[in-house]
Amino acid sequence: MNELSPKKLTAKDFATDQEARWCPGCGDYAILKAVQKTLADIEATPENTVFISGIGCSSRFPYYMETYGFHTIHGRAPAFATGVKLANPDLDVWLVTGDGDGLSIGGNHMLHVLRRNVDIQILLFNNEIYGLTKGQYSPTSRPGTRSPSSPTGSIEQNLNPCAFALGSGARFIARIVDTDLKRMPNILIRAQQHKGASFIEIFQNCIVFNDKVFAEFTEKAAAKTRQLFVEDGQPMVFGPDSAFGIRQSTKGVALEVVNMEADGVSVDDLIVHNEKDHLLATMLVNQAGIDDFPFVLGVIYCDPMSSYDSNVSAQVAEAQEKSPNADMKELLFAGNTWSVS
Amino acid sequence: MATNLAHSKASDGDNDSQSPNIEQLESVVIRFAGDSGDGMQLTGTQFTHSTALMGTDLATFPDFPAEIRAPAGTTFGVSAYQINFGARRIMTHGDEPDVLVVMNPAALKTNLDALKPGGTLVVDTGAFSARNLTKAGYKETPLGTSELSMFNVIELDISKMTLEAVKEFGLSNKEALRSKNMWTLGLMLWMYGRQRQSVIDWLQGKFAKRPEIAASNIAALNAGHAFGETAEMSGDLGQKNVGKADVPPGVYRTITGAEALALGLVAGSKLAGLNIMLGSYPITPASTLLHQLAALKQHGVVTFQAEDEIAAICAAIGASFAGSLGITSSSGPGIALKTEAIGLAISTELPLVIVNSQRGGPSTGLPTKTEQSDLYQAVYGRNGDAPIPVISSSAPGECFFAAIEAVRIATKYMTPVILLTDGYLANAAEPWPIPDFDDLEPFPVSFVEANQEDFRAFRRDEKTLARNWPIPGTPGLEHRIGGIEKDYDTGNISYASDNHQRMTDMRQNKINGIAKDIPAQEVAQGESTGKLAVVGWGSTFGPIYRAVEGARADGLDVSHIHVRHIWPMPENMGELLAGFDKVLVPEMNTGQFATVLRDQFLVDVIRYNQVNGQPFKVSDLSARIHDLAK
């Protein structure tokens, strides 16, 4: 640390002099603001912070962060991030990607960075559309989505990012809405503190090519009735006056929505969120938004285990400890040698 | 363990060169051939180690199928290992074997054409069952027929003698027969007076957890050796002596190209003062480098087996961004996948070493066979104007120095570098005089120091045009890089047309400028002007050298030039080529380096090409050279 600069950094100190080139009204602006504020709040050091991105609208993000940054190639950001962490595990690495970059061209890398549990934060901006290439449907676009490349409607099944992440072995999964500046910083902090890969799906509105695609649960009126914000150790209640709750279905292995008063159910009968419960997380991400089930936000799953980069460092350290005198000469002369005089 | 040849005892092997009953030979070529499951590669490797320890010079050629265990007894499952060893300098693995050892009919069928007329053929008759003959495509046994009449055929029931030798260990028939390669090895070690101890040590180490397997293999080895001693054979199966080669003094070891590459990359990283981060994805014949480096963690080497070729190079670039020496290794198809990322490393000006162990192409091609057909891919194969230095290696041990040179250029010029080897180099072994690490010139890297006033990520060295290297974790140097065109001065995104012209010119000039920083092109053999220059690159060094040597002995005016730096080439290259009436370029491709030479120097080169998956034969090259130089 530089002793001459005890001044606490503010959100502004994490902003670069580059003018952001997103469309006016783009959800990315709100996310950028939340991230800059969070870094200031947690007193992050700019020199130890790295933002890595692929290609797409969201991937311009590093240019606007006064930290180290690498705008790489389409879909491959997880691999670059892995290399950065292997070279210097002390760096705090953030990965910014989108539904096309992270789940289409880069789906394979996303799977493996989660499976290996590399200690990074992954912010996946999901707007269910290709923005930078002018509006084609993406792997998260719902069937029927009309776009320049699907004029009569997409006929593909859409991918559920959190279900994908859980299936890939992710140990931290959270969801939040782009403009939710009240609750986003805390989720970012939780992700940053989590050792291992943290996967955050951010519902991000593309005002030009897919405006209001999440309106059914993000519009002010809908937010109250259609959002369930889960918190570890808290019963799952939602809706106006917390009138609704989630309990285990009596009809099978599933969760169900109850109207507590009408159904004669008390808070004690509801499911208490347990971040370490993988089966619960699976049900939450798969049922979210279907029929009367609310859209689930917050930290859905968090069950840490040792990270890939720390395990790699440990193996190297162990080998060095076992052979403290390993030098080039010893290596060159290893095995059978003979001398000619 | 070090053996001093001046004091080594002849307790085992080391056939007495004074004995009148022992035939003295200048050099011998032996080819071991059998089923993939017969352990021919192990037999060859162990014979090689034992031979090297005796002080003979040697070169080897492992020649194996792509299938791990092709159906037993089939011709496409035949695996072979050829070794040329001698009391003189050995430059190639030998055109034609003097001795061919075949463990089954399929091995005979596929390798007989190679055997020198009058050569010795050792046959395991125990494997010549009707079933195996049919599988190999023989209607009746070739043994005893006119097909083999021009060879000295030694028929031995190696299978039966192996079973007897290991009877006491109570193994199944199948397990016991696995030792027949060791029986054969024992016989050949006796025949050429090679010692057994290094093989015994190796077997005990390899089968430490299954001592009965170690013991049965050693018993088979000893039985083969004893058979030679007691059978009182003479002539073709009598003892022979191949003396020590007159090689420069020093401490030697055997080394394959893959081993030398690993050592060279580690040495290069130490000379640069960096840690290695290798990102790699398994692919034949490049995986060996991943295996080698994965075992060197005690030297601070980090290896990352990525999910695919793309992730492998991207992780390596990420590591270079963060201050490590990023390395990636693959073969042609994998390099194709890495192409976009190579462009990013060029654009962001990060050091990176890309090793291509070439194999036969296109597409999946011939995974286990050697070729030099990725030269266009290396020099030209990217989108945009994307120049990159390309270096090649000419022999297994030479891979060590080529790797160091690749690291030096990558770090000094802040650029990815492609290092071309091939399947032959990766697997072939030779005795190697171990260099003194202290004699190698260090080229320490310096990162940009913290809190620089007027810091710029793309500030350039005026002479080399290389940008400086600021790494994350350093206060005050926060910056962003990426694949979008950058402003020449600030490094910020720039779409300005003049700037793109300037940046494109700079990238070109930076790489072209490396020509001033590499050794002038030397002539490997012969005069620096004359009638004919034979210009090669890569693993063809041995056969070209021998062919030119032969032609010169016949009085022909021929020189051998072997190029390490493919791109850019040394500054004197054009002038050197202009000094010859004719230029012949032998390559294991359809003429790719010839194209580059024509393009760069307007030389009317003559192509000589071969893409049959095999290294050049000296005799073929000699014929062409005689045609052109007479």
Image (tube, helix red, strand yellow):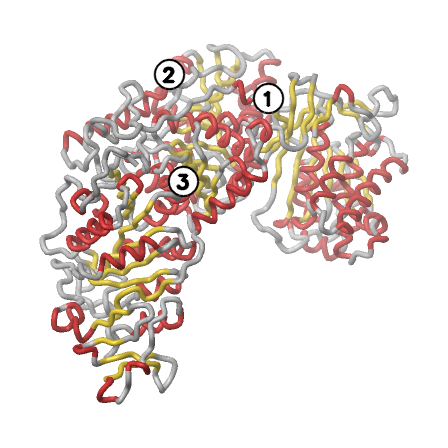
Q: Nearer the viewer, residue A169 or B620?
A: A169
Residue A258 visible, this angle: yes
Examine the rendered structure and indicate whether residue B50 appears above or below residue B579. Answer: below
User: Which quarter of the figure has residue B613?
Assistant: top right
- Give coordinates of residue B193: x percent, y percent: 80, 29
Examine the rendered structure and indicate whether residue A22 appears above or below residue B533. Answer: below
Q: Which residue is mark 1?
A: B546
Label of residue B571 in the image: 2
Kind of residue at badge 2: Glu
Question: Which element carries disc 2, helix, strand or loop?
Answer: loop
Label of residue B484 in the image: none
Q: Residue at 90%, 37% (x, y): give it.
A: B230
Is the C-beta separation of discs 3 and 2 under 8 Å?
no
**Alpha-carbon distance for marks 3 and 2?**
37 Å
Q: Foreground mark, 3 or 2? A: 3
Q: Which residue is mark 3?
A: A87
- Give coordinates of residue B364: x percent, y percent: 46, 47
Is the C-beta separation of discs 1 and 2 under 8 Å?
no
Question: Which element carries disc 1, helix, strand or loop?
Answer: helix
**Alpha-carbon distance for marks 1 and 3?**
45 Å
Residue B145 visible, this angle: no
Q: Local crowd at mark 2 within 10 Å, few (<14), some, or many (≥20)? A: some
Relative to A318, A72 lies left or right: left
Relative to A334, B457 lies left or right: left
Question: Which element carries disc 3, helix, strand or loop?
Answer: helix
Q: Residue at 46%, 30% (x, y): give it.
A: B269
Can marks 1 and 3 be said to lie on one chain?
A: no
Disc 3: host chain: A
Disc 1: host chain: B
- Give coordinates of residue B412: x percent, y percent: 37, 25
**Alpha-carbon distance for marks 1 and 2?**
27 Å
